[in-house]
Image (cartoon, coloured by chain):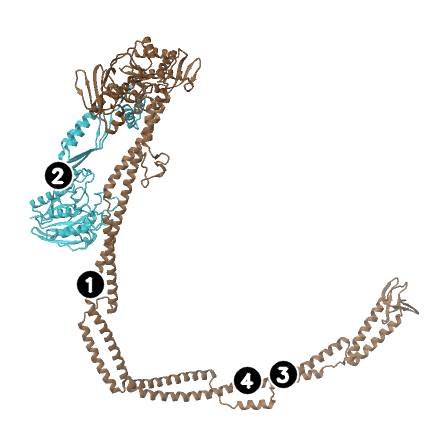
Amino acid sequence: MKLKHIQLHPFGGVADRSFTFLDGLNVIEGPNEFGKSTLSNALWHVLFTQSKLTPSKLKKVMGRWLPKPSGDHVQVSLQFEADGESWTLNKSWGARAESSLEKSGGQSIVDPSTVQEKLFELLQRNEATWQHVLFVNQAELTRTVHALQENANQIENIQPFVLGAASIPGDISADDLQDAIDEKISDHYGRWDLDSDGPQKGRGIGNPWSVGVGPLLSAYYKQETVQAEYHKVIAHEKQVDSLNSQIRQVQEQLEEGREFVETGQELRNGLAQRGSLEEKEKGFEKELKLLKKVMMDWPGAAKIIESKEGEYNDVSKSLKTIERELEIAEQLKAAENLKKGYKRILDSKEQLKAASERLAKSNSIPADLLSELKNLEHKIKELQIKLEAQKLNASIESQQPKQVTITRGGEAAEEISLNAGENWTATADGKVTFAFDDLSIRVESGNSDVNQLLDDLQSAKDRQQEILRALKVDNINAAVAADELYKKAFAEEHRLKGLYQAALHDRSEEEWKSKIAELDALPQTRSIEALKDERSAAFQKEARLKAEIQQEKDNIEGWTKEYKSPDSLTDTIINTTAEHKVTLSKLEKLPSLPEGFNSVPEYFDKLDRKAASQRQMQERLGAFSIELAELSGASPEKTAEDLREELDFQERAFQKRVNEGLALQRIKAKLETIVANRDEADPLANLESSIAAYFSKLTSNRYQDIRLDGTAPVEVIGQHSFETDLLSQGTAGSLALATRLAMAELYLDEMDGFLILDDPFTDMDPVRRKAAHICLGKFSENHQVILFTCHPEHAEEILKLTNASRPEMDNKPHLGTASTETPDSETPEVDTGRLF
Amino acid sequence: MPLKILHTADNHIGLSFAKYPDEIRERLVEERFLALERLVETANEQKVHFFVIAGDLFDKQTVAKKLIKRAVSILAKFEGDSVLVLAGNHDYYEGSDNKLWQTFTSEAEGTCVIPLLKQETKEFDSDAGRICFYACPCPSKHSSDHMIGWTVDKDKAEDTVHIGIAHGNVEGFGLDSDNRYFNMSETDFQNSGLDSWLLGHIHVPFPKSGTTGNPSFFMPGIHTPDSIKCTHPGYAWLIEISESKAFKYEPLTPGAVRFVRINDSLTDSDDVQKLRLRCEEFDLQNTVLNFQLEGRLDEEGKKAFKDLCTQLSNECLHFSDDSIIATVLDAAAISAKYPDGTIPNSLLLDLLNEEEHPEDAQIALEIMESINAQ
């Protein structure tokens, strides 16, 4: 688009003013009140602001340009060339809001939206690109780098432009594609947790996410919702089925019992009567049976008593006889015992006699002599021990055979024959004497008086022999044995005397004999045991007869009391029999008891239980019906079949989303592989070199190169390199202008377009400004530039250094002092916040 | 004179068709009555003796009273002996408190319409002979046990035609893997000792072929289609039973609306043209048509397909398209869009070679096109 002519009629403080633009650099120079800001805003609004605005938007966007004090509209007309054609654009806002766009020789477009659509088509770049790249106000020039970064998303992708001739329409950079895929994946998995393969934080349909939900989770929620509904419906159907099943069972049970209960109710009265009559009839039957028995028994009762009393007396007599026989039997048994005792007396007497004879034959040893004998025995042993203590060893030997008489101690002399050369040896107590021939040799012990000892020994032995002879025993042992024998015989005789006396039991033998003779005279009897058995049987019979007699007597007493007399009893039987017949007759007329029952009460019991059960079932049925009605009322709108179908659909839809997610991840991986394998030149290198070229000129070749981060310069490179944040204000301004011109050049490449600059060089020193003017002049060789300045010397300089021209202006008076024209010294403002 | 029975079932009056737009929904709801009316008219023309509905005359227990009344009023126009209406599993009868059947019974009083709500026999002396019907209604929506066992012990006179009326699945014929729908078997029918059974529940007709013989059971199928799953025009049986108990039967097609789902695969413009011709064979004004097509088309094919869909939207009773048609992608098409050497070109060609996931290239292309559209 190339601007040709603009008319503001009115706009802001301008009542009617026109400007005619030329190709190349147009310099509009004037003081602050000149209306440069008004003109630039008019240019912006005619190109980018629709004429049809809501009242509030009109006030906000165009309000400040409505003529004061009472102007109700603004209007701008613009002539331009685009797409090889001449175009006339008219827009008015406010009371006469309208738009028209007319191609030379063509039809006019008047629909505001269509006009705007066509304008965007002719402008070729989007609104943000025009705003942030091609309309440059004074204040924003130095913010160029930041502005480009801040609005990068809105400005058109620079990639195709930097590629220049190599660019391919519709091509997409790896970064953009990666960003788009990442965004797509991020969006697709919105609120989805890939690790758990479910909603983030497990938030299912009970507590679903509402913000940031991606298509996958959305499909999941739909599937889960339908599934929950489906299960709910299935549960509801099962509940209804179960209830129906219970209803059916109860109804079947009711039906089963219905006939029984209904029939029973009809039979109830008749059967109730039958019940009582049956009881009565049974009573009559029982009573008649009793009466008939009494009738039978009463006449014979007296005879029975008489008979039984006779029998009773016989038994009593018999019992006495038995007892007498038993007494004798017991006496006879006592006599046998007496005889045994008498025999024991006789035996004892015999034994005593024998013992007395043994005692008489025994040798009685006087105690003093026995004692003396024991003393002498002791004394003899002591003397013999003393003599043995003076033992002599004697030895003789003869040369010739010789007869020798030898006396050793107190022993008798002994004769021995010695052979020639034979040696004879022996021992002797105290002394020894050898006598042969005429020679006698006596040897005595020298320790004591052996002879005295021998004498004492002999004396003691003599006395001992004397006593033994007197006692007629051989030795002391015999004396002791005789003494012990005597004492034993004495004791035995004494014991047997005691036994004999005891056996007599204080009776004499004669008395024993007399008693035995008396008992031997008693008669013989049966055994005691047999007699006792017989007595016991007799006792029992006697008791039984007594009881039977009493029973008969009681019966007679009772019957008499009850029936007075047998005649009276006969009357009672006749009456009762008649009543019994009447009852039976009534029973025949009543309904009979159903089969399977033994009695009316049994039947009634079952009937009552059945009827109660029927009532309970009826109540249950009622409750079930209410429950079923409630359930039916709460029936889900959709059926299980519908929901199953819907669930299948949602499951497929969810699976489709899952597959889409997987596809996106595969695409992302594939793209990363492709990018990693590409050895591609930096696509922004063209932009970098273009900015560097401008910047080199603007800094008199102080810096030859720059480094970009994205599209923003971050470092200038020359003899000294600096990060852009460290540059002086003037150098930073030069870098901003270089960047702006380079980008404008790229965006305006191969199209008609324009660049608007509002006093961009105010802060530059003369040297930099001159360089800037030259660069701008160079830029304007290919593109139309509208430059506003309030500095006449700047205008003069640029006109001098370049092929710039001043646009023609049809200068009409201002609308009045009420103009809101912004002083040129101020930064032009547009209340939309988007221009300059 | 043969004894004539018109046998229908699964009329599902009260189906709401909620997923369709109002005007279509009304048409589909109305169709269920209209098809029933057509059956009654046919029955009258054919001098049918008994009009038997073997369950599911109504779609649910909560059918509006006015719909019940209208159904009864249509059936009451039957000029034969009786209309016998069995409770099916959708319109089951669990007991005397059932509102649906209370209304129905009340409306049917004094007409030839007889609800069959209990296991009982209904014996008739028609001018074509004596016939005894054995009613086996459903007492609930689901049951693992069928309801026909009681007929075995009933005495059956030889001079009478014995016909059972029941509702439920038949083993080996319908689908009831969970055994929830009163499943009956051929053995059960044989054991019953009846001459034949008139059944309902399965929405396709049986016998599948033939017009004579003594089938152990008849299944009429739904009388007019009710959903896209129904691939037939809707049927009922006109059955004639001779004095010798020989059966002759012919299908009736009272339905006027068809549901059609086409789920073919499209590969080129020719396929689209074939699809168009196929659609033109339908009575589109009375057809609910749904596409579930898949495949790939080039730009020309896609345009033709789009045009066809637009045309069908205008001509069909209802048309919906759930197709997934991808754009034909080949190396040449990709290179035409993204010249060799560009990232999109490399990515698309690589994805195109992924045989396991042919859809990936299409998805990537869509992302690229969305970037360019911005």
In the picture of the structure, the residue carrying the numbered disc 3 is A499
The residues tagged by marks 1 and 4 sit, at their Cα atoms, a distance apart of 94 Å
Name the tint of chain B in the rendering: cyan
Mark 1: which secondary structure? helix
Q: Contact (CB < 8 A) between labels 1 and 2?
A: no
For label 3, the crowd category at 10 Å Cα-Cα, with few meaning under 14, some 14 to 19 and many 20 or more, is some
- Residue A197 in the image: above or below residue A452: above
Q: Nearer the viewer, residue B57 or B315?
A: B315
Mark 2: which secondary structure? loop
Q: Is B146 displayed left or right of B281 in the figure?
A: right
Kindly identify which chain the residue marked by label 2 belongs to: B
Mark 3: which secondary structure? helix
What is the x, y in percent for residue A232? 28, 45
In the picture of the structure, the residue carrying the numbered disc 1 is A262
The residues tagged by marks 4 and 2 sit, at their Cα atoms, a distance apart of 137 Å
Residue type at tag 4? Asn
- Give the brown chain's letter: A
In the picture of the structure, the residue carrying the numbered disc 4 is A337
What is the x, y in percent for residue B167? 19, 47
The residues tagged by marks 1 and 3 sit, at their Cα atoms, a distance apart of 106 Å
The residues tagged by marks 2 and 3 sit, at their Cα atoms, a distance apart of 147 Å
Kindly identify which chain the residue marked by label 3 belongs to: A
